[in-house]
Image (cartoon, coloured by chain):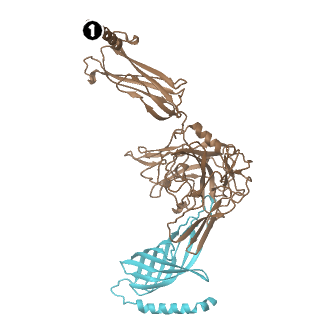
Chain colours: A cyan, B brown
Amino acid sequence: MNFIKKYMFQLLIASVLVGNMHNLFSEEITNKSKTNLSSVYFELAGQGPFFSINYDKSYYYRINFRGGIGAIITPLSSYYTFPIGINYLVGNKNIFETGVGITPWLSMSDNIKQFGKKNNKLHPNVWIGYRYQNSGDLLLKLGIAIYAKDINHYVVLPGISLGVTF
Amino acid sequence: MLKEILKKSFVICFILVNLLHARPEWDNDPDYRTYRGYAYVHVTDENGNGKSGIKVYLKMEMTFDTDGDGAVGDPQDLEYRSKSTSKFTDQNGYTYLYVDITVPSYWYNGWKHIRTWLSGSCITVLSTSGTFSNSSFWIYPNYNIIPDDCDRDDISDNIENQIAEKFKPVLHRHPNDRQINLENIETLMYNSGTLKGWNYAGYTVYNSDIPPLHIVDYNEAGWIFKNSYGWGSEMPAYELWRIDFNINKSTSYSGAAVGNRPLYYHIFKHESNYYVQYWYFFTMNDIQGDTENDTWHEGDWEHVTIKLNNELNHVAVNFYQHYGGHTKFPAQCWWSSSNSASSIPSQGYSESRTHLHIWISKNGHASYNKNDLVYRMQVNIIGLESDDFQDQCDYETNQSHFKYDFLEKLGEIEYSDVWLGYSPKGNSKFWLPFIGNVGEYWRHGSGFATTPSPRMPAFRIGYYSFTINSSITGFGNGDASSSINIFPPIVYDINGNTYVTAYPLYFYEADISWVQNNSGI
């Protein structure tokens, strides 16, 4: 509850922005035979959060679900990542996209020969960004992923995605 | 007067003609001709002293026209003859050899070739002169050799042995290190080693117990497509070969049995300096509990290098630590009069204290001087996760040691453009040219390897460096060259305090620092 009070103003601004975005990005759907579009794309940073290959499906240009697989490689800790999320879409070709996601980090350390242990992580996040999407065309996404490390510590990670929509 | 001169000239000419063309006693059969080839050989060692007991061969080959028409080259009338012999050099390094070829007197001599060579698997020939002739029956060969160079590195084995014995170190062990003893790689390979290979598509194409370690397969066209000692078209990268030690957690740390614990060494010369490296092999590098995700790998080659000048006095010591290291001067290092575990080290070198003391860090097995700064790596992943590893060397001296029972020379390798692979030179260790990784390693299945198991010492290119921009390549003598593949890149500083580390990735920070940890209390 304290959290909501503390960030009441920011939440209000955000909700207003999201509400207005619907008008800002709304376009009449024309010449579309499909209203449910699938996309495959490579994402650099963002919800990945290093790099990931993703699939998502948009329904009626209003909502989409995403899932992907990525990796984090460092000399010490390294992980497979599985970004998943649900987004609200505003617009049809030039789209404002926002949503929530969660990215499990599965340790790459393996237990073969009884060595090593796994130290898995779970990182919830919020995504806000621009999305260009057109059936049979390129997919482009630009935005930021906001990770909450704890109540007072946020990490903002820009992301860019490129793929195809079909 | 003129008459007298002509008379004397005639007598002189008569004597000369008879001297030059008179047939010697071993060629006085009117029906046969005997051709004798001579060699007067002198063999000296690398110091210019005559070398006795060296076996020298002489061979003479000749062709003849057998119909006596003088038309040498007619295949129907061509005969080939050869003879060879051998003798040992005397105490001054000299020997005299000859061979005779006897043929019918009407045979006409055509082509001839006479040559000498030395016999001995441990001889390295530094220079030669006059070892053959196509025109004369007399040759005077000179050989300058290293007579006892079984690994063919242009350094006498005797000198190598003296150097290795003189500086052989004392290895201090962290009392809580999981590894109990040094490992013997040959024993480990034979008892539990499996050679595995993958093609570039990731499929297993070889999986069999060792021996053999050296696998070469040719396709129908005669191309090498598998080669564990070099390049193969199906397996074009060294990462596609690996020795997998079939050990488990309960047996992996004991190391070799007492009596079977080697300390490997490698000595090479570069420009005017000698370098002696002591290599020690551990079964495991297992730092579980020291990091978030427990990096580990089987097979752990570590080493120090002592740099010597041309008079075999040492100049510097390089302590190797995780892709980098510290360089120290002799006055900074700790030495003792023997390599026994009970020996008490003192700082500063003297001719009565020649045995280097090395403090090995816990489980990671980096090599340190006493009171050295120790390696620390801190990883920060976009502010969400972090990891931290630091060498632990803060143990009291002489609590525990990695003892060894004997010195074992690694030798050298050489590359063949024809063979497209490496071979051990002379009597060098047969496993030294193996190109793959030595041991299984964490994350191997993922395909992302930043801390894989090591390669054989012969391929640890760049670790001989004592100064920035050193260009030493190959295993000692420049015969084996390879691209430098060091990750992360760390630059040595002769002063021992400045290190440069660069990671080419952007989403995390990995800072390497060298922190005070009271190594070797």
User: Can residue A166 be spotted in the picture?
Assistant: no
Question: B160 or A124, which is in the foreground?
Answer: B160
Query: Which residue is found at the position 43% from the left and 23% from the top?
Result: B39
Question: B39 or A159, which is in the foreground?
Answer: B39
Task: Residue A161: give x, y in percent of width and height.
Answer: 44, 76
- Quarter the C terminus of chain B occupies: bottom right
Task: Residue B167: give x, y in percent of width and height.
Answer: 64, 45
To which quarter of the image does residue A104 belong? bottom right
- Quarter the N terminus of chain B occupies: top left
Could you tell me which secondary element the residue under label 1 belongs to?
Answer: helix
Question: B293 or A84, which is in the foreground?
Answer: B293
Q: Chain of mark 1?
A: B
Which residue occupies the extreme front position in the image?
B1
Task: Residue B314: give x, y in percent of width and height.
Answer: 61, 47
Instruction: Report the amino acid beneath label 1.
Output: Leu
User: Can residue A156 be spotted in the picture?
Assistant: yes
Query: Which residue is found at the position 43% from the left and 74% from the top?
Result: A41
Task: Residue B210: give x, y in percent of width and height.
Answer: 56, 46
Mark 1 surroundings within 10 Å by alpha-carbon count, few (fewer than 14), some (14 through 19), many (20 or more): few
Query: Which residue is found at the position 52% from the left and 63% from the top?
Result: B448
Image vertical order of residue B352 relative to residue B123, above or below: below
Image vertical order of residue A107 relative to residue B26, above or below: below
The residue to which callout 1 is attached is: B6
Question: A147 or B361, which is in the foreground?
Answer: B361
Q: Is residue A40 left or right of residue B169?
A: left
Total numbered circles: 1
Image vertical order of residue B393 relative to residue B155, above or below: below
Q: Is residue B271 left or right of residue B305?
A: left
